[in-house]
Amino acid sequence: MVGDAGAPRSVTSRALAVLAAFDEAHSRLTLSQIARRAGLALTTTHRLLGELTAWQALERRDDGSYVIGRRLWHLGLLAPVQLELRQAALPYLQDLYDATRENVQLAVREAAHALYVERLSGRASVPIRTRVGVHLPLHATGVGKVLLAHAPDELVDAVLADLAPVTTHTVTDPVRLRRELGDVRRRGYATTAHEMTLGTCSVAAPVTDPGGQVVAAISLVTTASRPDLAQLAPAVRVAARAVTRRLASARP
């Protein structure tokens, strides 16, 4: 089958292009927006949207816009990062939250970003930008610095070559950040202050798999005015090590 731009495109690839039009910054799209982002004709997009909506991969809202549907959400929960890691981590994330009443987060590395797979918070927790499913820069977050510190050298070099500021406090000096990553590996945890969201700071520690590879990071995010940030590091590290042990015991 020939696509709208003249290149061969199967029905499956067109449907995937429609789904790929959605991301964190574009969670709700109109027909014309989806067609433009997917590179498809309006008529083709309209037909595919009908099929995807009937299958519940997408949902059509009253105003005519589209959002990701429940079936994709349920399928996403079957991914190992959700089933294995989240189930292993959740009891210890809950313990950490109960002890601190601060934001507690679990993230994995996806390419050059931190993908947040769990977050616990309460009414007294400081407001932050993260939510489950969002991607944030590795160099500007506590979990990101942990994941970056244990990432392949080529990825570290690529990230250090493009350090965009998120706030005025984001570390954008590659020499300084490389030094910080070395500190993270030596002491076993990372910290941030005002780097992702002004007024907040974080402590993060690594979770490893049975082979010793860092597969995730746990962080605690609190107000930057809290005087005992360093004293929170042991609690975060204990939670991370507990998840590591749980992952090891869950596999033969």
Image (cartoon, rainbow, N blue to C red):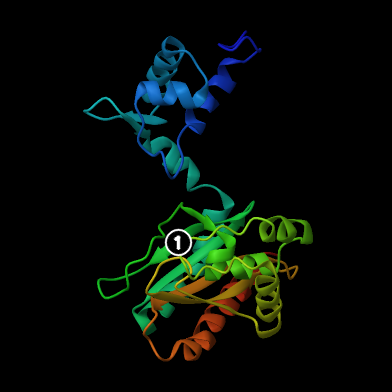
133 vs 94, nearest the viewer: 133
Q: Secondary structure at mark 1?
A: strand
Mark 1 belongs to which amino acid? Glu
141 vs 217, nearest the viewer: 141
Give the residue at the far left of this rendering. 62
Q: Can residue 37 be spotted in the picture? A: yes
Residue at horizontal 36 percent and vertical 31 percent from the top: 29
Q: Considering only vertical position in the picture, is 14 above or below 132? A: above
Place of residue 109 in the rendered image (x, y in percent of width and height, measured from the top left): 61, 58
Residue at horizontal 66 percent and vertical 74 percent from the top: 176
Neighbours of disc 1 within 10 Å: few (<14), some (14-19), many (20+):
many
87 vs 162, nearest the viewer: 162
Which quadrant: the C terminus? bottom right
Q: Can residue 54 be spotted in the picture? A: no
* Quadrant position of residue 206: bottom right
* Quadrant position of residue 145: bottom right
Q: Which residue is mark 1?
A: 118
Place of residue 213 in the rendered image (x, y in percent of width and height, measured from the top left): 72, 67
* Numbered disc total: 1
Q: Considering only vertical position in the picture, is 191 above or below 160? A: below
